[in-house]
Image (spheres, rainbow, N blue to C red):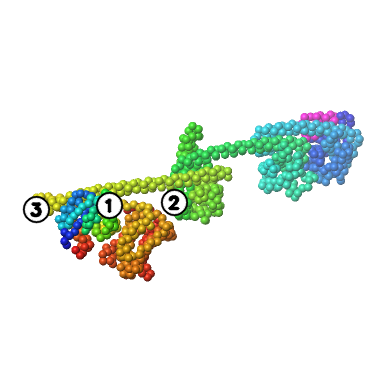
Amino acid sequence: MDTQQYSILVVDDEENIRWLYKEELEEEGYSITAAASGEEALQMIPETKPDLVVMDIKMPGISGVDTLIKIKEMDKNIPVILCSAYGDYKQDFTTWASDAYVVKAASLDELKKAIREVLEKRYPEK
Amino acid sequence: MKRMDSQQKYDILTKIVEISSSASQINERLTQTAHYLCVKDLAPTIAFYLLQRRGRRLILRIAADSGGSLQLPAPPYSYKLPLPDDPLCKPLTTMLPNSLDPDILHADDLFRTLRPHGWSLPLADENQAYGTMVLLNPTPFAIDNDTILFLQIICRQITLALRSSILKNRAQQKVRRLKFLHQIGAQLNASKDVQSVFSQLPNSALTFFSHSASILHVFASDQSPAKSIDQGFSNAKQRELVLQVSRSQANRAKFSSHPLVIDKTSSLPLSTVYQHFFSQFCAHIILPLHSQNRMVGTLEFFLADKPQSRDLLPLEKEDLELLEILAVHMAATLERTQAQDQLSSANQASLLRTRQLTLSHQMKNALLTADTPKETIRLTLGALVSNEGFTCSPALYLKFQEDKNSWQALHYATAPDQAPTAPDNVKERNHLKTLTNHLLEASAQVPQEIIKVVAELKLPKLDTAPSRFQQAVAGKKPIIIPTDFVTVLHPKLKSLLPGQKSVVIPISSQDQLKGLILANADHINMQDLSYITLFTDAAALALDNTQLYQRLQNSLASLNNAQSRLAQSEKLMALGEMATSIAHEIKNPLVSIGGFARRLHKKIPDQSREKTYSQIITKEIERLEEIVNNVLSFSRPESKRFEPCDLNLLIKETIALFSRELKNQEINLKTQLTPEMRVIECDGNQLKQVLINLINNSIQAMSGTPTDDRQILVRTSCYCDLKEQNERALVEIEDNGNGIQKQFIHDIFNPFFTTKHEGTGLGLPICHRIILNHHGDIRIQNREGKGVKVSISLPFNHKIQPRPTI
């Protein structure tokens, strides 16, 4: 898969995490934009039209889940991966609309795997 | 008879005068006279016949004989001559000497064979006849006029002596009567009680008339005989006879104000009972006892028909007058003592009542101090058995056990030895305490072996109990019955209830039988029973109160317990929430540290010390992450709360999400939303997700349906669920899509089951889970014809606790 074709929007209120994701994912080849909140993300999406959104759930302002619903209302086709410290969301109906759910961890292997899977599923033609 | 000259006559007369006026007894004087006249050869045999007191017969009193051929028996004689037929008595009517012939002598006369001839001379003065002097001879003899005159002079002399003797006797008798009357009067006045005076009557009254038995009837205010006392009957049969006679005459006496004397000569018509009576008695004297025109009773005497009293007629007028005075005295005393009795018994009754009321008041107060049912029962039994209480010792309490339908003995008490000291007004409270302790002692004194017997004592149902026992239990009122009726229930009761009578006291509250007290009733009466009832009613109430109090305490304790447990779990929950939020706060920096540590680790050349350092950092962070993950793996950031929500609006909002898609797919979505829909308690976001899922499914199912006939209907309604007994909202989503293949219909709620190429198989399971979370119900079925119908029912009101954070 050619990762360089894809742009990913990272949404997290923690600057360090945004930076970590950006460095790690850029190393993978993706082009990364970042937003510090749900509101900022919702503003950026129409402009940047990312191929994928990676988003934290617990954020000040609108939560990740609510942002997810709004993103889907905006464009059902943008895949969203939810990412949170909480393990209980894994099989939860509140995150049903997301395309994947990943528990936050220092190792980004899980996240990278999920991104790859979601992208391949969403854009099989690329 | 030889002739006497004047000197001789003078000597005889002088001697007779001397004898007659001597101080000796009249019988002695008559005897001397008779003997002297015999010695002087006036006749071989001389006899004196005297009239009986009542003048109905002549009785041979004195006889003297000079010849020795006639063996005279010693007096007293039983020879009686009926009046007035006998020739011997003729002088008493004619007042003249009368010559006697053998053939006219009385048939059983002593002198009939040996002295058939003689003269009878009257002993009488102008007022009264006393008897006759009879001169008797074996052969007929004549007396000349001179001698008759002389004899008449002698007779007059003897008459004088008789008269003075009788007068003296009478005077003495009168004195004795007065003394008797005085004595009786004093006794009556001094006495508090007629019975004791009555019992002394024989000692005093007997000296006048020889009554052998007597009865005193005391009448009640309505003049019916209320009490009878008798004395002097030799046997029960005699007594019965006399009582019968007495009863038969009672009415007659009531209407008479004077003594009534009934004897064989009475002109009254005599019943057969009376005729039988007169074979043993000679007279029946009834004294009506009047006081203030009221009959208060009768005093009756029965005079025995004794041989030695035959010469005396039973009563004289003076005797009756005396008895009348006695009757007045008796009546007054009776009235007085009755009044006194009434007064004192009323006084005693009021004293008793005061004591019992005070006591039951104190006992009730004591009962109020109890705060457990056990103590209440102990106090109740204590009050019942105590000598200051109701003196029903011993007493046993049985509790009715509804589950076993039997009676279990719980407490037993006997009277304590010592009484508490009298209450001092200042120390009323202390006395109550003393009294309470004293009452509690009653149970404490029971010996160990009896306690054991009581503990093991269990009575079966009372169905087999004697009816009077059951009556008490059913009537819920104390009743006194013979102890045998109680002990019949269990052999061990015999040792616990030793008395003759027992009182059965049902203890009930709110019309429910709670227990039963069995106690000795030898020392109580019906009036005590009413006080016991008063007291035990209070005891039942107190028992009820303490039971309620205990139940209240128990529920208070369990409430406290629950509250502390709740507080504990709330604390734990708060602790868990805190731990979660701390873990979450740690997790984010940890991710940054770990992430960058890994990046460092990647950049550091292999085999360097720094590589090892970064390796350690990475590993340690992994360890920390695992710890934090363990905390966070079962938690979520916020607990969803159920909020009032408009279901119709929620549906409209959800459908709006699909507007573009519906248009693209050419699906006609209709809604029938009921205006009666009420606000529902729910998690709006969750329900929205359910609706999104279901509508999404319906849209996807339309692929095979012609574009001009793609229809979805969303309908809401309200209904009442009879089974769950609540009101519910119903949401129905119908489509005319492909439907569900028959073989899959049982799998649709299984997780990860899917027929779609892109599906996760979690859509319907998640819907199911959300609806269950709302205590609702979801059903999916193929419609007849084509498509699927999904029905969701949700209760309007339910108490759903949000899921705990941990």
The residue most toward the front is A47
Q: Which mark is residue A63?
A: 1
Chain bearing tag 2 is B
Count residues near mark 1 (Cα–Cα under 10 Å), then give few for <14, some for 14-19, many for 20+.
Answer: some
The residue most toward the right is B145
Task: Identify which amino acid the numbered label 3 is placed on.
Answer: Pro
Count residues near mark 3 (Cα–Cα under 10 Å), then give few for <14, some for 14-19, many for 20+.
Answer: few
Give the residue at mark 2.
Answer: B456
Residue found at x 20% / y 49%: A15
3D distance between C-alphas at marks 2 and 1: 73 Å
Q: Tell me where residue A10 appears, x and y as whole percent.
A: 21, 54
Task: Identify which amino acid the numbered label 2 is placed on.
Answer: Glu
Q: Which secondary structure class fits the magenta region best?
A: helix
Residue found at x 35% / y 64%: B668
Give the residue at mark 3.
Answer: B605
Chain bearing tag 3 is B
Q: Which residues are magenta?
A: B11-30
Q: Nearer the viewer, mark 3 or mark 2?
A: 3
Q: Secondary structure at mark 1?
A: loop
Judge left or right: residue B665 versus residue B444: left
Judge left or right: residue B124 versus residue A120: right
Task: Identify which amino acid the numbered label 1 is placed on.
Answer: Ser
